[in-house]
Image: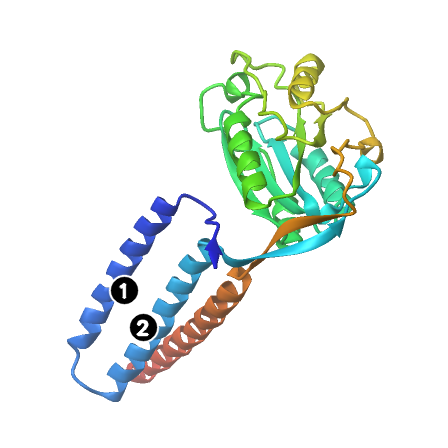
Amino acid sequence: MTFAPVGSPTLLLIIGVALVILRVSALYRISRQSASPQRRRTLLRWCGLTAAVLLILAAAARPGFETGRDVTAAADPTDAPTSALNVFFVLDRSVDAPVSAMRPDVAALIDQYPDARFAVISFATRATVDWPLSDDVWSLDSVVAGLSPYIASTPDPVAQANAFAARDVLRAKAEAALDDYPGSQNLVFYLGTGDPESLVSRGSFDMPEGTVAGGGVLGYDAAGGVDAGRLQEIADQLGVPFSPPGTPITEVVPTVAGAGSADTLQVADRRELYWLLTALAAALLLAEFALTLREYRKNRLSRREVTR
């Protein structure tokens, strides 16, 4: 079994330790109560809620089993097996970015690559991972549907937006994907405006050789327009084509490096277990909610009887 945490392992460990301390302190208070049926019920509820918390923490660590599969290598580079693809979406979510126009394009691209793994990296002044690399498309669809521009958190956010902010995060995640899934290839789709009103100095999206096999840079008009020159520069650095605003998504045809002359490829795959852990945690939390609601109604009825 291996783990692929959704965030920093150190942060997850700190959160886990803090929650365990809180739950142990609650258990100590329960232990000081006199023995009674009420105490036993409270202890059972403590066990259920504590188990739910631990299950959620375990799900955040994303446990899973590494497997492998043979996929047919396509003769045409653009027909590479989708199960061998890691697709990275780099989204401009700065204050004036037209994220509502990006959402359907992201959904359409997801549909073009069944069985692929997807990751979503968003940026404005800095980059964050909105969705770690995973083949859980069902959950990803809801994440994409909820994407919106960031709320302004810095003075003059439009001028501080950085079209190159996602470089380091993308580089790290793309390199890790090739290590975690030997035989796979990375596609990168950059969706943005080029931040035409930004005063931040330009950076670079130069990636290590072989890290990006294909993808595209898709331009969008914002309130301040679009910086096509900057987007073309990003496309050249990534080694992918640039599609100006208004280009139909059906015309965005990425170029994928050839898979070689072999008839089949051995591609690493991963069967994740976080969905099972979260389902069990949800069941325990639902039971706790039902018991709390029942207790509230019972206490409310008791207070009414006392006041009569």
Q: Which mark is residue 46?
A: 2
Is 144 left, or right, of 299 in this rendering? right
Instruction: Give coordinates of residue 86: x percent, y percent.
Output: 65, 42
What amino acid type should be assigned to the residue bearing mark 1? Arg
In this view of the protein, which residue sits in the foreground, 61 or 80?
A: 80
Q: Residue furthest bottom?
A: 37
- Residue 303 in view, yes or no: no
Q: Which element carries disc 1, helix, strand or loop?
A: helix
Check the image and report above or below for 21 versus 160: below
Q: Residue at x 49, y 18 (%)?
A: 156
Q: Which element carries disc 2, helix, strand or loop?
A: helix
Check the image and report above or below for 277 versus 180: below
Residue contact at pointers 1 and 2, CB within 8 angstroms: yes
Q: Residue furthest front?
A: 262
Q: Earlier in the sequence, mark 1 or mark 2?
A: 1
Q: Residue at x 28, y 55 (%)?
A: 17
Label 1 – label 2 distance at C-alpha: 8 Å
In which quadrant of the rendered image does the C terminus lie? bottom left
Q: Residue at x 61, y 32 (%)?
A: 90
Instruction: Give coordinates of residue 135: x percent, y percent.
Output: 63, 51
Instruction: Give coordinates of residue 132: x percent, y percent.
Output: 54, 45
Instruction: Give coordinates of residue 262: x percent, y percent.
Output: 76, 43
In this view of the protein, which residue sits in the foreground, 203 or 181?
A: 181
What amino acid type should be assigned to the residue bearing mark 2? Trp
Q: Which residue is mark 1?
A: 23
Q: Which mark is residue 137?
A: none
- Residue 298 in view, yes or no: yes
Check the image and report above or below for 236 versus 56: above
In this view of the protein, which residue sits in the foreground, 214 or 16?
A: 214
The image quadrant that residue 162 belongs to is top right
Query: What sort of colour scheme is used for the picture?
Result: rainbow
